């Protein structure tokens, strides 16, 4: 039996060490980074606006708040709690029928951005709500006592008061969106994720995978640095 095992082992295929074809790989890095930045930027612009609106409504429609509306608040909370916990890869698959009906495809950069906007919107909305909750109620009551309109209270009192923490929250989401853009490569979404899968994972070239990881880490560090600096500057005022 041992002899049979040794014979089988001797005839088993051996994976040769993979030599990276840098002449092919290097020209692909620049476009991949550009696609990732485009995906992150478009996602953050759209999700940033939608998430800010939903998050503000989550806070202002609470009982006792300036736009108190229990049914609307319950509906928004349900939607946020429904979408936010879903892992992004599963959300990509779940949104495929919706993407086919709305943008005509469930693969590629457009599909990746669509799913990223949905995921980021509900994550941002909860962060916005949590930061608005931390505002001193006395500040809002003072604005109401002075006769400020509800819209003026929202945009001139509430959001400016929470701006510093909101920037930190948005920074956290940007980092998450960078991660999501990498996962979007699983559906051919382009960017660093697609680059890593196509030229690294599928070719068993771990050097390319390592390059992709380093690029993502650098992007995350830069985003965190800029976010921290902006938040610190605003909170000092």
Image (cartoon, grey):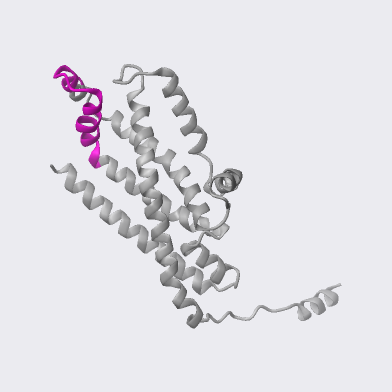
Give the side of residue 103 with respect to residue 123, left or right.
Answer: right
Query: Which residue is pictured at 56% across the width and 47% down the height?
Result: 99
Q: Position of residue 189 (x, y in %)?
A: 52, 58
Seen in the picture, residue 94 relative to 150 is either above or below; the reply is: below
Quarter of the image for the N terminus: give it.
bottom right
Is 143 a magenta residue? yes
Q: Which residues are magenta?
A: 141-164
In the rendered image, residue 109, in percent from the top left (x then y), is placed at 50, 57
Q: Quadrant of residue 159?
A: top left
Residue drawn 39% across and 62% down? Answer: 217
Dominant SS in magenta: helix
* Residue 11 x %, y %: 78, 80
Tell me what residue is drawn at x 57 percent, y 56 percent.
Answer: 107
The reply to whether the magenta stretch includes residue 108 is no
Vertical arrangement, residue 146 with respect to residue 95, above or below:
above
Q: In the rendered view, does 55 fall on the left or right side of 85?
A: left
């Amino acid at each position: 039996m041992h002899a049979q095992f040794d014979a089988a082992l001797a005839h088993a295929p051996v994976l040769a060490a993979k030599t990276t074809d840098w002449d092919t790989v290097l020209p692909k890095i620049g476009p991949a980074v550009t696609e990732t930045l485009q995906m992150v930027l478009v996602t953050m612009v759209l999700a940033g606006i939608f998430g800010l609106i939903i998050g503000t409504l989550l806070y202002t429609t609470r009982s006792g708040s300036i736009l108190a509306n229990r049914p609307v608040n319950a509906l928004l909370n349900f939607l946020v709690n429904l979408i936010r916990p879903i892992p992004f890869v599963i959300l990509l698959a779940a949104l495929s029928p919706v993407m086919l009906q709305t943008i005509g495809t469930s693969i590629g950069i457009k599909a990746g951005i669509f799913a990223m906007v949905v995921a980021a919107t509900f994550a941002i909305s909860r962060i916005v709500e949590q930061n608005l909750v931390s505002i001193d109620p006395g500040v809002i009551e003072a604005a109401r006592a002075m006769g400020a309109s509800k819209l003026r209270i929202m945009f001139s009192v509430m959001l400016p008061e929470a701006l510093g923490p909101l920037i930190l929250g948005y920074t956290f989401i940007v980092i998450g969106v960078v991660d999501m853009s990498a996962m979007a490569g699983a559906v051919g979404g382009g960017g660093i994720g697609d680059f890593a899968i196509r030229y690294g994972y599928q070719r068993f070239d771990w050097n390319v995978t390592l390059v992709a990881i380093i690029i993502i880490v650098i992007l995350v560090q830069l985003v965190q640095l800029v976010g921290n600096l902006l938040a610190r500057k605003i909170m000092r005022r």
